[in-house]
Image: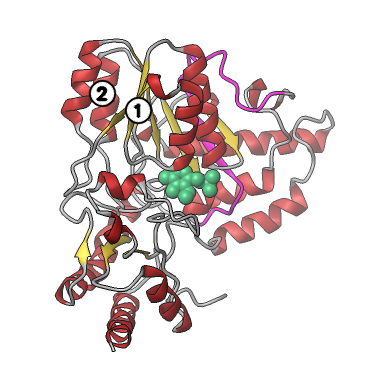
Amino acid sequence: MPDFSRYFDCNATTPMSSVAREAWIEANGRFWQNPSSLYREAGMAKQELERCREEVADHLGIDEPERVIFTSGATEANNAIIRYLAESRRGRLLVSAVEHPCVEAPSQAWFGEERCHAIGVDPVSGGIDLAEVEVQLRAGGVAAVSVMAANNETGTLQPWKELAELCRDHAVPFHSDAAQWIGKLPSGELGECDFLTGSGHKFGGGKGVGFLVIPEEADAFHGLIGGPQEGGRRAGTENLPAVIAMVAALTERSDSDLEEVAAANAVGRDAFEREMTAIGMKLIGADGPRLWNTSMFVLPHTKNLKWLIRLSQRGFSVSTGSACSAGRGNPSRVMAAMGLDFDEMGRVMRVSGGWETTGEDWSDLSAAIREVAGELTQ
Ligand code: PLP
């Protein structure tokens, strides 16, 4: 098993958990048949697929497992949901200004700029402007609302429960991209969102697999077309071993385990942040509720890539966020929404630990950053 004590990029991806890996290996031996075929073994694969669907539904507090559709990940899920909403509903999409590009781009593509209304966030806490959502809903003509549960860059948590309620009161469907929330925080009430997105590789469940949730009444929903799989709602042979592995990772920790993990792990992260502030880093979004594993800050000087390379030479994996989307030099919408100027965007660093990251790992990272700070000022 590789050593992940210096891996601080869990919001980008996580290694498969050992439980998930074992489940995947076993599933490749036992359940390789096509669940749509008609002989006995294929029937067993189909049954296993339905067991997985029930487990995901249970985990999210959903009574109707058929609301769950397996996909290749969150990008596909978000594309399919936004497209369905654009095609089936009239009016504007209210979408937060800090969404992942795989929500933002489909919103622009299928609703069109004139039908998208961006909802801003508080630059200090990163929290969505709930009052603005309410004003827009009261004004009418809203097709749907899409606000992520937890932000991949800042870790900011959005009030999805309140948003789901507010939308319900106005009979407007609510979608939440929960790719960064699921597996990190208790998820037993997420099924209250009409539409929901999850991704296996964000919680140790493996890459190229995820799921989406639709409301029961969305009979005409379809993602990929051209096959009868997933009740005709997502064509393509199901990647059953990947689904089994993802579900193994998802159910590895109960909601109360996750509460403990969150409380324990935030201690190391918070101590790290105190040290970072002491050496002149500016924390982003630290005043609002955040994921327990994430810290984003502006470095005091020198482009972030230079820090990243020196940390990488010391064995630490960190990220520059999508402050300037890798190599493209575009300013980040998320950072702009958080009130950063262009110069600051080039000095942003995101670190995101994992479930097993210890306080010592955080303090080793802090020591390495202090060393690099010393080198880069010389
Ligand atoms: N949504 C969020 C919030 C993410 O952080 C990511 C991954 O970075 C995605 C969606 C895309 O997920 P996937 O890699 O499963 O397509």
Give SS at disc 1.
Answer: helix
- Left/right placement of residue 142 relative to residue 309 reads left
Q: Position of residue 218 (x, y in %)?
A: 50, 15
The relative height of residue 38 versus residue 335 in the rendered view (above or below) is: above
What residue span does the magenta drawing correspond to? Answer: 204-225
Q: Pointers 1 and 2 in contact (CB under 8 A)?
A: yes
For the N terminus, the image quarter is bottom right
Residue 220 is a magenta residue = yes
Instruction: Report crowding for label 2: few under 14, some 14 to 19, many 20 or more residues within 10 A (C-alpha).
Output: some
Q: Main secondary structure of the magenta part?
A: loop
The image shows residue 354, relative to residue 240, as above or below, that is below
Q: Nearer the viewer, residue 155 or 376?
A: 376
Q: Position of residue 241 (x, y in %)?
A: 68, 48
> In the image, is 337 to the left or to the right of 231?
left
Q: Residue at x 49, y 58 (%)?
A: 326
Q: Nearer the viewer, residue 164 or 264?
A: 164
| Residue annotated with mark 2 | 165
From the image, tell me which residue sits under label 1.
192
Tell me where residue 70 appears, x and y as whole percent.
59, 35
Visible in this render: residue 251? no
